[in-house]
Image (spheres, rainbow, N blue to C red):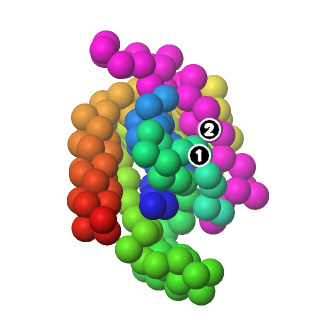
């Protein structure tokens, strides 16, 4: 299965969700801001990568995990992705589009805007990392739910 975590900027909530999904965070202890700041790809998306579906890794079951910066046009971008997936020979039952926007808080928005849009990285990155810590439980539940959907889908396909 192909899983695409998507959000407006593609630098924070979708990266954090993909990182959880891929097991890139320490287990067995409370996360620290440094854990988030040290994640590969956190708050690093370039202008050229916006709108691109970026492979972040394979999960423990071989599913491909991607992230996407889809800006403020999910109603245009997501149907186009589904159509392109089918045109490429894929079946929609093997594609899971997961919005992480429900987990984004105002702190993340402030830090992300400062870092990515205003290019005030030294100011914005610690703020968005702090906001991500505050939203950690929501994102964790989102990823857990995503994995349940994948497992149910795999059961139905067998």
Which percent across, then down, holds residue 89? 58, 82
Give how far across and how far down residue 69 sits, in percent: 56, 59
Of all residues shown, which one is farthest toward the right? 48
Q: Secondary structure at mark 1?
A: strand
Q: Quadrant of the C terminus?
A: bottom left
Decide whether residue 31 is among the magenta residues: yes
Please name the residue shown 31% across and 33% down the image.
Answer: 136
The quarter of the picture where the N terminus appears is bottom left
Q: Is residue 135 at least partly visible in the picture?
A: yes
Q: Residue at x 63, y 55 (%)?
A: 54
Badge 2 vs badge 1, beta-carbon distance below 8 Å: yes
Q: Quadrant of residue 85?
A: bottom right
Q: Residue at x 55, y 29 (%)?
A: 39
Kindly identify which residue carries mark 1: 56
Q: Is residue 18 visible?
A: no
Q: Residue at x 31, y 60 (%)?
A: 154
Asked which secondary structure carries label 2, the reply is loop
Q: Nearer the viewer, residue 89 or 129?
A: 89
Start and end of the magenta stretch?
A: 25-51
């Amino acid at each position: 299965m192909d899983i695409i975590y998507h959000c407006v900027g593609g630098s924070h909530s979708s990266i954090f969700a993909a990182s959880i999904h891929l097991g890139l965070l320490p287990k067995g202890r409370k996360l620290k801001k440094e854990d988030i700041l040290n994640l590969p790809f956190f708050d690093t998306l370039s202008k050229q990568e916006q709108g691109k579906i970026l492979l972040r890794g394979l999960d423990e079951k071989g599913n491909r995990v991607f992230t996407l910066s889809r800006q403020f046009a999910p109603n245009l971008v997501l149907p186009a992705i589904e159509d392109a997936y089918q045109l490429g020979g894929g079946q929609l039952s093997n594609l899971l589009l997961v919005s992480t926007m429900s987990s984004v808080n105002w702190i993340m928005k402030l830090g992300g805007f400062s870092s990515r849009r205003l290019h005030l990285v030294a100011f914005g990155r610690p703020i968005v990392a702090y906001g991500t810590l505050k939203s950690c439980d929501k994102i964790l539940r989102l990823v857990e739910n995503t994995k349940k959907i994948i497992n149910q889908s795999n059961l139905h396909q067998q």
